[in-house]
Image (cartoon, grey):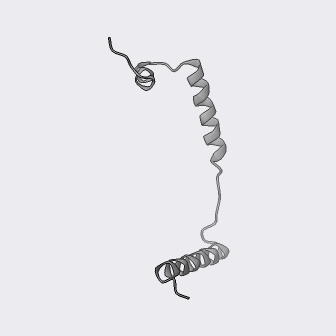
Amino acid sequence: SLLLGREESRALRTFPSPEEELELANAKKVVEEEEEEIDIDLNAPETEKAALAIQGKFRRFQKRKKDPSP
């Protein structure tokens, strides 16, 4: 006789159980809540200033990481 583990037996079923359907529905709700649309105007002058500031800080960070002497 062949004994299947939980994952193998789940894979063989065609339809999810009511508990699995509820679990899937809850997981979908969590994903939908996490997906927040952010609308950033990439052509705005403030966006360019922010990007340049972030890039500069990142470059300094990389330089310090490479050469930690003051």
Residue 38 figure quarter: bottom right
Q: Give the answer, above or below, for where 51 lies relative to 1.
A: below
Most distant residue in the top direction:
1
Q: Give the answer, above or below, for where 54 lies relative to 41.
A: below
Relative placement, left or right, of 44 versus 61 is: right
Please give the count of numbered marks on the rendered protein.
0
User: Residue 8: percent from the left, percent from the top?
Assistant: 40, 24
Which quarter of the rendered picture does the N terminus lie within? Answer: top left
Q: Give the answer, above or below, for where 2 lies relative to 29.
A: above
Q: Nearer the viewer, residue 44 or 33?
A: 33
Q: Nearer the viewer, residue 25 or 8?
A: 8
User: Residue 60: percent from the left, percent from the top?
Assistant: 55, 81
Residue 17 figure quarter: top right
Residue in the picture at 57% in, 30% down: 24
Q: Give the answer, above or below, for where 39 lies relative to 68.
A: above
Relative placement, left or right, of 14 versus 44 is: left
Residue in the picture at 48% in, 83% down: 67
Most distant residue in the front direction:
69
User: Residue 34: percent from the left, percent from the top?
Assistant: 64, 46
Q: Nearer the viewer, residue 12 or 34?
A: 12
Which quarter of the rendered picture does the C terminus lie within? Answer: bottom right
User: Residue 51: percent from the left, percent from the top?
Assistant: 59, 74
Relative placement, left or right, of 16 versus 43 is: left
Residue in the picture at 59% in, 18% down: 18
Most distant residue in the bottom direction:
70
Residue in the picture at 61% in, 78% down: 53
